[in-house]
Amino acid sequence: MNKEPRKSPKGRMIHVRLDDETHRRLKIYAAQASATIQQLVEDLIHQKLIKSSGRDVQS
């Protein structure tokens, strides 16, 4: 078994707790959009930050 540490993606990680029904619906929505839940959440947060600041946010 390989004991080398995994390389983590750049950036911060957050955790979100969802009820089962919301998670199920989100998974279906993501599949229909050919996206991952991670991609959807990142896009939504990015859009909200742009709206609230009136300018683009650096990724």
Image (cartoon, rainbow, N blue to C red):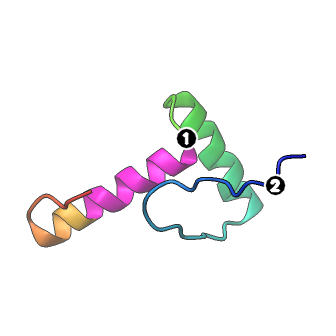
Q: Residue 52: x percent and y percent?
A: 18, 71
Q: Residue 27: x percent and y percent?
A: 64, 43
Q: Position of 1 compared to 56: left or right?
A: right
Q: Amino acid at mark 1?
A: Thr
Q: Residue 23: x percent and y percent?
A: 68, 54
Would you say residue 41 sits in the magenta stretch?
A: yes
Q: Is residue 35 above or below residue 43?
A: above
Placement of the C terminus among the 4 image quadrants: bottom left
Question: Within 10 Å of the Cα at label 1, are there few (<14), some (14-19), or many (20+) other Cα atoms?
Answer: some
Q: Is residue 59 above or below residue 40?
A: below
- Foreground: 27 or 56? 56
> Residue at coordinates 49% horizontally, 31% vertically from top-left?
33
Q: Amino acid at mark 2?
A: Lys
Per the image, the residue denoted by label 2 is: 3
Between the C-alphas of marks 2 and 1, the distance is 28 Å
Per the image, the residue denoted by label 1 is: 36
Range drawn in magenta:
36-48
Q: Position of 28 compared to 11: left or right?
A: right
Q: Earlier in the sequence, mark 2 or mark 1?
A: 2
Residue 30 figure quarter: top right
